[in-house]
Amino acid sequence: MSDGAFRVLADATTGGDPATDAARELIAGLALRPWGQVAASVYETGRLVADAPWLAGHHQRIAFLLRGQRPDGAWGPPEGYALVPTLSATDALLAALVDGRAGTDLLAPVARGLGALTGTLLATDARALPDTPALDLIVPALVGSINERLAGLERATADRLPRPPLALPDGLNPGRLRVVRSAVAAGAALPPKLAHFYEILDAAPADAGPTLTAVGASPAATAAWLTTAGPDAGPAAHAFLQTLIREGGGPVPCPAPITVFERAWVLSSLRRAGVAINPPNSVLASLTGATGAQGIATGDGLPTDADTTSVSLDALARLGRPADPVSLWAYETADGFCTWPGEDGFSVTTNAHVLDAFGQHVARHPDADARYHRAVDRLSVVLSGHQRADGAWQDRWHASPYYATACCVLALTEFGRGAVAAEAVDRAGHWVLDSQRADGSWGRWAGTTEETAYALQVLLAVPTTVPRVDDAVARGHAYLHEFAAREHPPLWYGKELYCPIAIVRAAVLAACRLAAVRTSDVDHSVVDCGYRATKPTT
């Protein structure tokens, strides 16, 4: 079975706790694949087709894009989340069509992609589009690229495609893209977070050189640099791309690498659920950068951030290696804590994770500086204040309210203070109960194992023994038993929605462990619901 799936942990001869066995194999993958396990990306793969056809696997990437096109001509998830992947895939196939080596077989899928863009996706008001990172840069860049390619087509080919130039959504303009590109051309230093989008900025990374592994934790940005500089200019980056291409059979993921992000979330999730784990020292050591002055980054090529720093500190504390979360004060703002300085927006999940980190610290050190205690009090109120009227939370780093709600409920249940925190948790529990689907699952667009796992974690954290909760948990647990081996849809915010496979696996395993403890049937439930990751390739 592929890396995107699980195998049932059915071998009864292994002995020991099935949850521990499943977690052990999952954690082994963290060490064997240190760049992380992320599903293939339509956006990133499209950029490699358009910008770096010289890289190995070019035709396999074209085939991946063709397989992924929806019947309506678009690519990607529902609603406005389809805009960025559809722009990238359409532009990529159009580039391959212009190249000529792929023949005219790409005409029909390009026409369908253009139809989806002009018919619905670009006709959306910009205010209704999801707040995915740098959407105001990516969309104008790709619309401009598509229009240039259409204008350059031979007449015989162009006559078979929609001819009007693509227009930007109302309320979106290319102004910021022009400013950033002009700054790049003038040699200005850009914020580190923009390295993630180098492929659309006509930029060269400031630290470009033979030892650079990845530009901005993005295969597309890395490929764009190597296309300009030549593969010999960055042998480490070229090797990085070759590994990703080989592991994915041509297509590439994004973001990558996500070394610290993946390890922190997996370890924190499993330990919070009571799963016994013993990670290798190399995995633990990779998290200790969170104790530095500015914290730690998701992976090489990205700036440090409060979210990854908080979850790393939480994981270390739960594994018996607590550290002072002093680095988090660098992210304090008037509204709470930012993901990084200058963030456009507010993240409830970042603030929930900061509450976890501070809560761990004051629980171990009741005599800690009063500033830490005030932060715990403050975050209890801040998170409750961002709760929706229906009892859920929504965040800017995940498309599903079940993820944000689980983050907030777990933090408030364990570390929140005051009646306002308790009331918020209670409202969240009622929302989860009321939104369960007939088949026992939960999900924004359809029932998914990931979202069902988060919903179960909420219900199992809410301090209640109402019979209705037990019934909902049993039905949700049964759903995970039946469908945990399904491929997980992308729900995490990046340039497009993406799926961090190991993190989702850990969330499902954690939910199953908690549900098993609730029903006092640990072994049977975890055997059914705990899954071994396919052994990683090296």
Image (cartoon, helix red, strand yellow):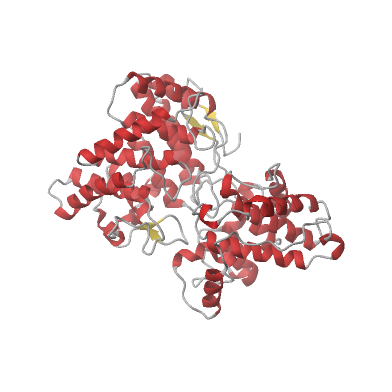
User: Which residue is rendered at x = 38% and y = 42% of the image?
Assistant: 393
Picture quarter containing residue 148? bottom right
Residue 279 visible somewhere in the drawing: no
**Residue 524 against residue 332 in the figure, above or below:** above
- How many marks can you see? 0
In the displayed structure, does residue 478 sit left or right of residue 348? right
In the displayed structure, does residue 398 sit left or right of residue 349? right
In the displayed structure, does residue 313 sit left or right of residue 15? left
User: Which residue is rendered at x = 70% and y = 65% of the image?
Assistant: 147
Image location (x, y in percent) of residue 221: 57, 63
Image location (x, y in percent) of residue 403: 42, 41
In the current view of this chain or complex, which residue is farthest to the right? 156
**Residue 235 against residue 431 in the figure, above or below:** below
Picture quarter containing residue 167? bottom right
User: Which residue is rendered at x = 28% and y = 40% of the image?
Assistant: 412
Picture quarter containing residue 519? top left
In the current view of this chain or complex, which residue is farthest to the left? 367
**Residue 509 against residue 172 in the figure, above or below:** above
- Looking at the rendered image, the quarter that the N terminus falls into is top right
Image location (x, y in percent) of residue 485: 55, 30
**Residue 188 against residue 306 in the figure, above or below:** below
In the displayed structure, does residue 72 sit left or right of residue 419? right
